[in-house]
Amino acid sequence: MKRNHDVRRLLRWYPASWRDRYGDEFLALLEDRLEEAPLTIRLRSSVVIAGLRERCYGSGMLGTRSSSPTQRRTGSLMVLVAWSIMIVGGASLVKMAEHFRAALPSSSRAVATVAYDTTALAGLLGTLFVVAGAIAAVPGFVRFLRENKWPEVLRTFVRSVVSSLVFVVATIGLATWARHLNTAQRNGGDHLYSGAFLAFALVVVITIGLWTRTGVAVASRIDFTPRELRRESYLAVAVSFASIVVVASAAVWGIQIGLHAPWFFNGTAAGVAASPWSAQVVATMLVMTLATTTALWGATRVAMTYRPTRVNA
């Protein structure tokens, strides 16, 4: 009985439409293959991978099996998720770059300043594109509410609201605490405060992730018109271009700091020999690179639906 239950649980890795069509045949095939043998880790892994692959193909993340509207929606949502990741990386960059101009020699300050300002401008434009996408989705959201689909995402929405309340309380508490500390204590001198700041950063990441999940849950249930979906896909491509500029200009900025003021990233005194790399630099660039890669993947899925050889919906 337990094995039959475990076999049926493996079906959850496949999309519902696939389970409805092929589920019974799949279970019969597994039973014939297993006979009395136990479920091995290798077999479980192969089923999980096959199920995830089927979900990717069905949702439009891979291949051309799905329709153009499905692929455009999925690609646009991938870009939305990517931008939420970029926000996390951007926040880390802003924190890391505080007072960087003062650390650079005047002769080397111009390139780093232009690169950082370009990063900020591209980040602002990307955010405006995301906001424009949210505004473009308003008519579809109204239809979503009229069709009484809100209960389907209520639990996710409540979690996002609770996380936001925790974020507000944590922000007030941390800001009040910081006012009683000097600069050195706020920048690593007080270990208790540093631990609290890391916890606060985790709350920020969780809050952004939950609201992104809520947005994806709502957008995936909205019946967009072809024109609305086309606008969303164009804006998604624009966001992906903004991501490229952000990560490229941030890399230039980091290289300039590493060449002319490597001590800045490590918080040591000016002129002290230091490595241009630090855990925060590596983590920040990895997050921003992940965001850009995801955005480009989503934009590519969108662009494929506009190829002349494909019939667009």
Image: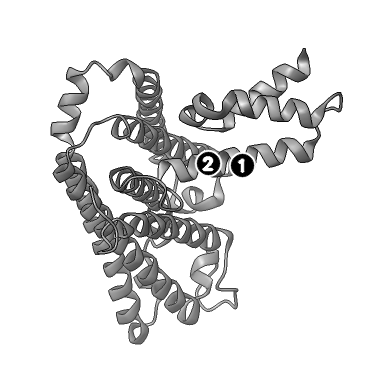
Question: What amino acid does circle 1 point to?
Answer: Ala
Residue that lies at the very extreme toward the right in this rendered image? 36
Distance, label 1 to label 2, CA atoms, is: 6 Å
Q: Is residue 166 above or below residue 252?
A: above
Which quadrant of the figure has residue 81? top left
Q: Name the residue: 17% across, 18% down.
A: 146
Q: Which mark is residue 287?
A: none
Give the SS element for disc 2: helix
Q: Residue at x 58, y 38 (%)?
A: 51
Q: Could you say where residue 20 lies in the image, as x and y percent from the top left?
A: 50, 24
Picture coordinates of residue 233 (x, y %)? 24, 51
The answer to whether residue 275 is above or below residue 230 is: below
To which quarter of the image does residue 2 belong?
top right
Q: Nearer the viewer, residue 101 or 145?
A: 145
Instruction: Name the residue type under label 2.
Output: Glu
Q: 13 or 156, which is in the foreground?
A: 13
- Visible residue check, residue 33: yes
Q: Which mark is residue 54?
A: 2
The furthest residue to the bottom: 107
Q: Residues within 10 Å of mark 1 (few under 14, many from 20)?
A: some
Q: Circle 1 sits in a helix, a strand or a loop, which is it? A: helix
Residue 78 position in % (x across, y down): 38, 47
Q: Position of residue 72 (x, y in %)?
A: 30, 48
Q: How are the colours assigned in the image?
A: one colour
Which of 26/140 is in front? 26
* Residues under numbered marks 1 and 2 in contact, where contact means CB atoms less than 8 Å apart: yes
Out of 9 and 104, give the one closest to the viewer.
9
Residue assigned mark 1: 50
Asked if 88 appears above or below 43 in the picture, the reply is below
Residue 218, located in which quarter of the rendered image?
Answer: top left
